[in-house]
Amino acid sequence: MAKALPLVAYTDLESQVEALERDGYAYFPAVINSEEISELRAVMDRLEALEESFDKHSSPQNGSGFLNKIINNSFNRDPLFLQYLDKPQLIDVVETVHGSDCHIIGMQSWLTGPGRPDQSLHTDWLPISLPEDVATNPRVKIPIFITTAHYYLDDISEELGPTNFVTGSHRSGRSPSGETEWQGGEEMSILCNAGDVVVFRSEVWHRGTANTSDQTRYLLQVHYAMRMITQKFPPYLNRFQFDDSILAQATPRQRRLLGEHGGGAYD
Ligand SMILES: O=C(O)CCC(=O)C(=O)O
Ligand SMILES: [Fe+2]
């Protein structure tokens, strides 16, 4: 069993950016309160998977071993999600690392039930692969292309299946292939409280772990990126349509985060 990762909350922007650069992730305690958690969980329970959006919904009732419900484009399914585009506690660090013209590339509601197995340690995306001696040279600074904000909507125990991270492993210059530690640092578990958020860059080594409890884990994932990284809103070939009534409730900043940009290179 992995050890609990010491959770350090940096309150100033500079330290939050440094955490993403040094550790590969940054921790934000108590971003949302218990009422907001209940509201989100209720909407996530209600939303139905749309096949054309690549949503998933398997469960013991339909012959699968465990509940796995993923709702892509959650921002387009209920106006409640708009506020999770630009939470005041997180958006400054996101815009600092990805640029003031950054956007989301996805947003998923994710329910994982008892029996969910361990994932393998992975990177979500390795933008640039480098020999380790180059990647660890302090003069080499890889931009942060993609981050994900994990909103944990449960108190996370080892049994419920925490996300595990290998601190600093984005500086290895590679994705792990069977490795479980980097430079002597082992993978460690994020055992945080409901309402806490972890923002992590796509190339830090991490994994979701097995749900050995009798409870379902509720997670909201918001994926941010530099503007030049394409948005992933299936279905493709122009079949994804924004819900006009939801868009009408979005602020200018939220609209930009959804993809309303001025012209730029390649537009
Ligand atoms: O479930 C988690 O905590 C992490 C999931 C993950 O890293 C992934 O699906 O890429
Ligand atoms: Fe991942």
Image: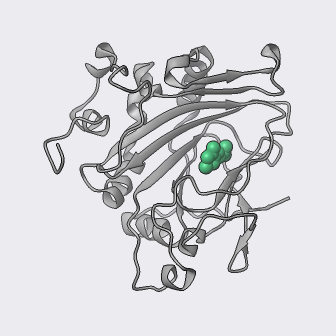
Residue 45 higher or lower than 81, as above or below: above
Residue 120 higher or lower than 173, as above or below: above
- Quarter of the rendered structure image containing ligand 1: top right
- Tell me if I can see residue 193 in this picture: no
| Quadrant of the rendering where the C terminus is positioned | top left
- Tell me if I can see residue 77 in this picture: yes
Q: Locate residue 112, reporting x and y percent.
A: 72, 32
Q: Residue at x 68, y 80 (%)?
A: 183
Asked whether 113 or 40 is in front, the reply is: 113
Q: Residue furthest front?
A: 237
Q: Residue at x 40, y 58 (%)?
A: 145
| Quadrant of the rendering where the N terminus is positioned | bottom right
Q: Residue at x 52, y 55 (%)?
A: 125
Q: Residue furthest left?
A: 263
Asked whether 117 or 88 is in front, the reply is: 117
Q: Locate residue 84, reporting x and y percent.
A: 43, 35
- Give the quadrant of residue 97: bottom left
- Give the quadrant of residue 111: top right
Q: Locate residue 67, reporting x and y percent.
A: 75, 26
